[in-house]
Image: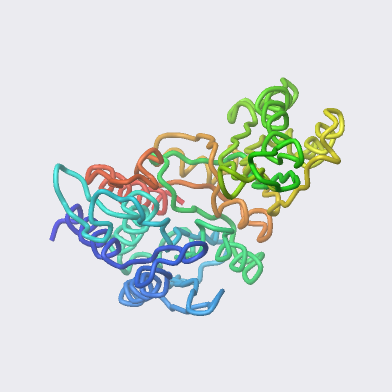
Amino acid sequence: MAMSSRVVRILRDLIAIPSVNPDGESEAGHAGELECARYAGEFCRRLGAAVVYEEVLPGRPNVVARFPSDGRAGKPRILFAPHTDTVSVAGMVIDPFGAELRDGRVWGRGACDTKGTMAAMLAALEEIGPAVAGLGAEVTFAGLMGEETRQHGSRHFAREHAGEYDFAVVGEPTGCRAVHTHKGSWWLRLRTSGVAVHGSTPERGVNAVTKMLPVVAALDGRFRERLAAPEFRHEVLGDSTINIGMIRGGTRTNIVPDECTIWLDLRFTPAAHRYGVPRMLDEFLAEEGFSGLVTIDADPCCAPLETDAGHPLVRKLAAAGHGTAGATWFCDALWLAEIGGIPSVAAGPGDIAQAHTADEWVGVAELEEGVRFYRSFLESV
């Protein structure tokens, strides 16, 4: 069987396995990464890898497959690390698990993000076959759970395997470019409180929604400008950004709302991170007179990724594909680098624009290029 059809078959197998991240809204029958991890683990075992399942959360393991090596001293230890979970299938206009092949594309949830990169990695390793032991690097495949929410899998792997690897390639759809830097991420909620009364006598209450309106305007104006100040600009990543993604307040039209919440998504450059984005927000709220008006409920602030583009393995990976790049999005590479001390990049076939879409797909030609990309990199080390 031609390898091009082989990578398509692997991807279709993976898409047909529901592995929706179960954090948040429940999707009965579709949630959890276990079966996807088992598929990848058995695939690697057939290729001669030593496979273990490291449970991170109940029923949600990382799968770790160490490929044989001839034992030559000094080989760099390279990690291939796609994630096994997908986002929700709610709102999809195609069968999310149908893995349909048509129009030169494979369709379904995870086709692009990121079962396509996983299929290309597995196909590349299968194509190399027993010769993997004689490569110039020791190779480990790790299917990481939970990337789409809080990155439990990569953080667990980084803690458990700190110091064991010299370089990590995280599977993400980057057009086979080596994404060596990406923005940091901070999600938080701002809340205002009021006093609920009947909507016919609003003067007797305190409207939490109207209290929030000047906060929204200031964040969307003056704070956005502060984030984009020249001193925080990055030559690859550009400016830091803020997105006011949701607003919720009140319970009925005829009741003055006693609570209003906005959800914020901040993406920031290394320079903004060094200054301190929470510090920047606190300073801004104080200057605007909002400190006593709002309360803050925040997720952990995730740092940007900054892997040296001149690292020898980054350069080899870039040469095997289409050079280096930066990204506005966040991925597992950060935790492997920050907790595990592993120089890490994200790289793989596909276009991030197709990730999370209602009709997610990846091109067959992209998959085939991904197989060549990963194999060429491993054989160049």
Viewport quadrant of the N terminus: bottom left
Residue at screen point 40% across, 63% down: 20
Type of colouring: rainbow
Question: Would residue 186 be found to the left or right of residue 378 on screen?
Answer: right
Judge by depth and name the residue closer to the eye, 337 or 12. 12
The spot of residue 381 in percent (x, y) is 46, 51
* In this view, 342 is above or below 351: below
Residue at screen point 61% across, 51% down: 334
Judge by depth and name the residue closer to the eye, 339 or 269. 269
The spot of residue 30 in percent (x, y) is 36, 68
Residue at screen point 66% across, 61% down: 340
Judge by depth and name the residue closer to the eye, 51 or 354. 354
* In this view, 328 is above or below 221: below
* In this view, 276 is above or below 91: above
Residue 104, picture quadrant: top left
In the image as oriented, which residue stretches furthest toward the top? Answer: 230
The spot of residue 53 in percent (x, y) is 48, 78
The spot of residue 359 in percent (x, y) is 28, 46
Judge by depth and name the residue closer to the eye, 203 or 328. 203
Q: How many marks?
A: 0
Question: Would residue 375 be found to the left or right of residue 198 on screen?
Answer: left
* In this view, 51 is above or below 299: below
Residue 161, picture quadrant: bottom right
In the image as oriented, which residue stretches furthest toward the front? Answer: 200
